[in-house]
Image: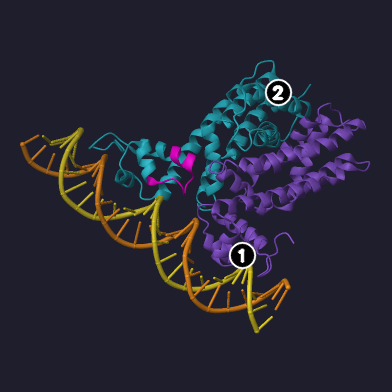
Chain colours: A purple, B cyan, C yellow, D orange
Amino acid sequence: MSSTTRGRIDKRQAILDGAFTVFAKQGYAQAGVQDIALEAGVAKPTVYNHMTDKATLFRHAVEAAAIAALDQRVAALAPLSDPGDDLPAALEGVALALLRLHTDSRYCALRRLLYSEITHFPDILDIVKEYGLDRLNHALADRLARLALAGRLRTTDPDLAAEQFLALILGPLEARSQMGTRQLEEAELATIARTAVETFARAWLTT
Amino acid sequence: MSSTTRGRIDKRQAILDGAFTVFAKQGYAQAGVQDIALEAGVAKPTVYNHMTDKATLFRHAVEAAAIAALDQRVAALAPLSDPGDDLPAALEGVALALLRLHTDSRYCALRRLLYSEITHFPDILDIVKEYGLDRLNHALADRLARLALAGRLRTTDPDLAAEQFLALILGPLEARSQMGTRQLEEAELATIARTAVETFARAWLTT
DNA sequence: CATTTATTGAACTCATTGGTTCAAGATAAG
DNA sequence: CTTATCTTGAACCAATGAGTTCAATAAATG
């Protein structure tokens, strides 16, 4: 066993989860370690048993959340590996899935945290590089490259196509969701997905 | 005179500027009123002479910055009111101007602040609604509507066209600039502008 | 059961910081 | 000059919160 303690079950995960929850809703500075301990169902010294610092606690919590978020996103690209006859429909499905993930309140909170603390925690930048949107871009570009090879996509630059596809989908979110504060309805997400794919198709797809 | 004091020249502006500078680089919670006073070249009690609270100080500083930012952006759209024969070139010029504004470090700081404190200051939402990207979208849509009427743009929905134009331009920034931490070179901005306008033109412009 | 280890609650230390007070000075208006 | 207003530095108060200490306890191991 890597980290199951003898005294009791491992509380590390509970601490990380609770930490992210509290950080997400309070911000780093405003979040008290006491609150985090309470949220995790744990005593304050226990937190310091597992994490040396409030700062490292923050880093680990954010990293775990970022990894989970990226995994979800990449998984949502799966349909593109084997789209049916109707490529636009497949793209639209993926777009909608990404939109749902991107408007999830937990993910919005993660982005808020990254934005706000990236100046105080320079090493958070590593997390962004490692598990950020770049990775999603690459994964999408891989799928698009296959489609291009199959003659269904008119491009020699799948990276650019992927970048613009994501931009068309996720770009409108910032304004429409009021910087992540307003929850968008499913119908609005569907509209964004449809119009984005429409434009993307006109520019990139073979007719 | 609205606010020129008798004792000395008006220090209100200096306080607001200093406040934004310090907030931008420290975040709300970490910024000390003492630091702000120092940055503004003023004593701490003087700050409280002009602003009742640290909170209201923050609100005013952020609002001033947001207004200035929006003004710059809208001004950058001017060339679209009278584009020459080469509409794509005009679009590309505007795109590049917007990209420069959007990667300005002061504007990145403003966005960071908004993102991080929008949960603690619900009334900041009003600032976003009033001077946020929506406004820019509308202003751009106005220009595009004129172009559509002139038959140079193939759309009955200028709002959508504007939204996608901005998305294609600004969307790639988040990933490329590493959430605003990396300063992009002029050449890279130009590339983004060129490719974005290329795609936009294929989807929306009359040939 | 005995031992080892982790957890717990509570109290404590210490540094930070928002906000205030006050007496002393500086400045403009009359 | 006189007066009213603003500024200033410094000290001060009160609250908050990070991180620690410690004795008591609970659980797993042998």
Residue A78 visible, this angle = yes
Q: Is residue C21 above or below residue B170?
A: below
Measured as percent of width and height from the top left, residue B28 is found at: 47, 47
Magenta region, residue range: B20-33
Question: With D18 as the anchor, is C17 left or right in this view?
Answer: left
Q: Which residue is mark 2?
A: B194
Q: Residue at x 78, y 44 (%)?
A: A95
Measured as percent of width and height from the top left, residue B66 is found at: 50, 38
Q: The residue under label 2 is which amino acid type?
A: Arg
The residue nearer to you, when weighing A114 against C20, is: A114
Measured as percent of width and height from the top left, residue B95 is found at: 64, 26
Does the magenta portion include B23? Answer: yes
Q: Chain of mark 1?
A: A
Q: Which quarter of the figure is the C terminus of chain A placed in?
A: top right
Q: Residue at x 64, y 43 (%)?
A: A174
Q: The residue under label 1 is which amino acid type?
A: Ala
Please tell me whether mark 1 sits on a helix, a strand or a loop: helix
Measured as percent of width and height from the top left, residue B63 is found at: 47, 41
Q: Is residue A141 above or below residue A179?
A: above
Please tell me whether mark 2 sits on a helix, a strand or a loop: helix
Q: Chain of mark 2?
A: B
Does the magenta portion include B53? Answer: no
Q: Which quarter of the figure is the N terminus of chain A placed in?
A: bottom right
Label of residue A101 in the image: none
Q: Which residue is mark 1?
A: A40
The residue nearer to you, when weighing A138 against B125, is: A138
Q: How many marks?
A: 2
Residue A178 visible, this angle = no
Q: CA distance from mark 1 to mark 2?
A: 50 Å
Q: Residue at x 53, y 57 (%)?
A: A31
The image quadrant of residue B44 is top left
